[in-house]
Every structure is written in structure tokens, then in C-alpha cells.
Image (cartoon, rainbow, N blue to C red):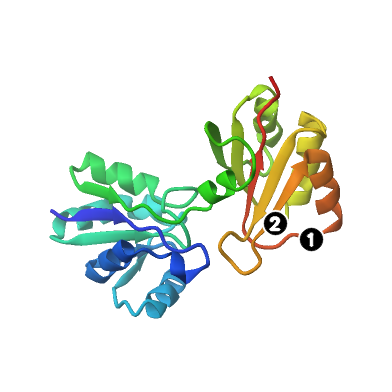
Amino acid sequence: MGKLVLVPTPLGNLGDVTLRAMEVLRGAEIVLAEDTRTSGKLLKLLDIQAPLRAFHMHNEHSLLDRTVQDIAQRTGITALVSDAGTPGISDPGFLLVRGCIAAGIVVEALPGPTALIPAIVASGLPCDRFIFEGFIPQKKGRQTRMKEWLEEPRTIAFYESPHRIARCMRELCDLLGPERPACVVREISKMFETYHRGTLGELADHFAHHEAKGEIVVVLGGAPK
């Protein structure tokens, strides 16, 4: 029976790839990729030749059973990668991991890049206890989710689109108050990495007048005691 290994890939800086990740990718019988074009470019840069197969949010439900059976019938490693970061963290992976475990397949996850942890530890906000919300709803349920944070004492981290960050800061400011501290982290590990720290009022004003680009993590201070 084969093995499934979740392999984190760099967020942007190629130097963040681990030696173990490269070893697994070189030895994999097949690499399941969120986007074969993106992963193909990465493997080419790393001088790794491995067969790629698409496995993403649009086909994971229809391909799940077949993919689990394929992994079980193999004798080597099947690697799962997302476009950047750790598979399963707001990326495809959970359904496959659960399916493989149910089928008795060994599942391993390598440590490596993820935008969540660097954003929290460098935000200046408490990181001894925190909650992660992934991508919050775009429409239905968005206000309900944010209202849950009114009395949440722990630091809150979530991902947001650059096209919605100005709206997000304005909504949070209105719901939670302009004095709640927060940090908007953009393009972690890339050339234009930035940390915008301040109150929700200050950040709402900043992003109302400055366009944001790239991948964004929002770190929100918990409710004051």
C-alpha cells in the first residue's frame, strides 16, 4: 500500500523550500497539484522531474474515491502540494487526508511554509493563544462571523482578498470599534512584504486610500478584558 505525504511549498521565496520537501518530491511516484502549471514551474526551478496530476477544489469531490484507490494500489509515495504553503490550510487536502485515513493509508505532513504563523508572530499581537478562521464568507454569514469576535479574547487570524481588504477593515471598525488593534500582512516572504499595524480605525482609513495587492493575512487583537 502506498503513502500520502503533504508537502508544503514556498509562499514566494524559493529559499523557503526544505531539503526534506525536495527529497519527497524527487522520490514521489505521483504529485497531486492544485494547479499543475504553478507546481510544474516550481519543480522545474528545483530541477525535479515528477509526474503531475491535477487535484483541486473543483474536482476533489468527483476524484476523491478514485484517488484514494490509486494511492492504496501504489507501493510508493503520493505527494500532495498546493500552489503555495501547506496543503489543507485553506487549500485542498482535508477530504483526501480523511479518505486515506479511512482506507488505512499512512498519511504524513511535512513541516514547512504557511502564511498563518509568520503573520501572527510578527504582528505584535499576543500569539500564545489564537484562533484561525481561514477565508471568512464573502456575503452570506460574513456579518455573523465577525460579530462572533465581539467577545473573543484570543487573537484572531484569517485570510482576505486584496479586493475586499478596504471593505473588511471598514466592517470590522464598525462592528468591533475603531480602537481594536490589528495587523494586515501582505505578500509574506516576497519582495514587497509589508506589515500594516495599528487600530482598526487607522487601518480602515489607510486602505480606503491605498490599493492593496497580493496575498493578505489579517491578524486581529482579541476583545479587551
In the image: residue 202, left or right of residue 28: right
Towards the viewer: 76 or 123: 123
Tell me the quarter of the image containing the C terminus: top right
Q: Which residue is mark 2?
A: 162
**Of callouts 2 and 1, the N-terminal one:** 2
Above-or-below relation of 107 to 147: below
- The 10 Å Cα crowd at callout 2, few under 14, some 14 to 19, many 20 or more, is some
Q: Position of residue 171 (x, y in %)?
A: 78, 38
131 w.r.t. 55: above or below: above
SS class of the residue under badge 1? loop
Tell me which corner region of the image, top left, top right, bottom left or bottom right, holds residue 192: bottom right
List x then y, in percent, for residue 127.
55, 37
Q: Amino acid at mark 2?
A: Pro
* Residue lying at 13% horizontally and 53% vertically, measured from the top left: 1
Residue for point 74% across, 59% down:
212
Residue drawn at x 83%, y 44% as measured from the top left:
202
Q: Report the residue marked by disc 1.
A: 211
Label 2 to label 1: alpha-carbon separation: 8 Å
**Residue 28's x, y, as percent?**
24, 66
Image quadrant in which you'd find residue 130: top right
